[in-house]
């Protein structure tokens, strides 16, 4: 993962931006790994299975898991994507990806919709529900 953070271009494209960050490619390059990527990023967003499938198509073996007390530490491995619960700031939830010493947020200046900007956060801006991480059992 490079030092440049990837901003989401579409209103519901945070998952695409996180995949792009993991793959060290552009947002548009990552979008090609998603089925109906352009329309889904604009309208509904992506589910965990969509992200795992996109990463698989890009040659990465990832799996998803629900976060609980027992496995919470797993989310702090670089390259892990987390989904935070819907709330006031992110009504549909939001994906972020773990980078060195923090989190890459593909829409750090939300709710500004005119110019989405990616940035670094030390802490998650909400409660993580599930993680998407490299599947070490498949290696």
Image (tube, rainbow, N blue to C red):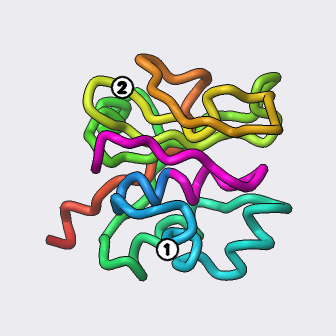
Question: Residue 96, image x and y in percent?
Answer: 51, 40
The residue under label 2 is 102
Q: What type of secondary structure mainly makes up the magenta span?
A: loop
Which residue is located at x 31 percent, y 71 percent?
60
Q: Which mark is residue 18?
A: none
Front position in the image: 7 or 70: 7
Q: Eyeballing the image, is 19 above or below 111? A: below
Which residue is located at x 42 percent, y 82 percent?
57
Front position in the image: 12 or 10: 10
**Over which residues does the magenta segment extend?**
1-17
The residue under label 1 is 54
Does residue 17 appear in this view? yes
Is disc 2 surrounded by few (<14), some (14 to 19) or many (20+) residues within 10 Å? some
Q: Eyeballing the image, is 133 above or below 90? A: below
Q: Secondary structure at mark 1?
A: helix
Q: Eyeballing the image, is 56 above or below 110? A: below
Front position in the image: 88 or 118: 118
Which residue is located at x 45 percent, y 35 percent?
104
Q: Is residue 35 left or right of residue 63?
A: right
Question: Residue 27, image x and y in percent?
Answer: 54, 61
Q: Is residue 19 magenta?
A: no
């Amino acid at each position: 993962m490079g030092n440049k953070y990837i901003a989401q271009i579409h209103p519901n494209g945070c998952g695409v931006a996180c995949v792009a960050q993991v793959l060290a490619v552009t947002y548009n390059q990552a979008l090609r790994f998603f089925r109906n990527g352009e329309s889904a990023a604009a309208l509904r967003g992506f589910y965990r299975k969509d992200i795992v499938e996109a990463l698989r198509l890009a040659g990465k073996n990832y799996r998803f898991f629900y976060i609980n007390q027992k496995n919470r530490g797993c989310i702090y491995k670089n390259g892990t994507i987390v989904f935070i619960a819907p709330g006031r700031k992110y009504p549909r939830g939001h994906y972020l990806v773990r980078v060195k010493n923090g989190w890459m947020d593909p829409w750090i200046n939300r709710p500004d919709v005119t110019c989405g900007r990616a940035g670094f956060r030390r802490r998650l801006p909400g409660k993580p529900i599930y993680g998407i991480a490299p599947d070490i059992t498949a290696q």
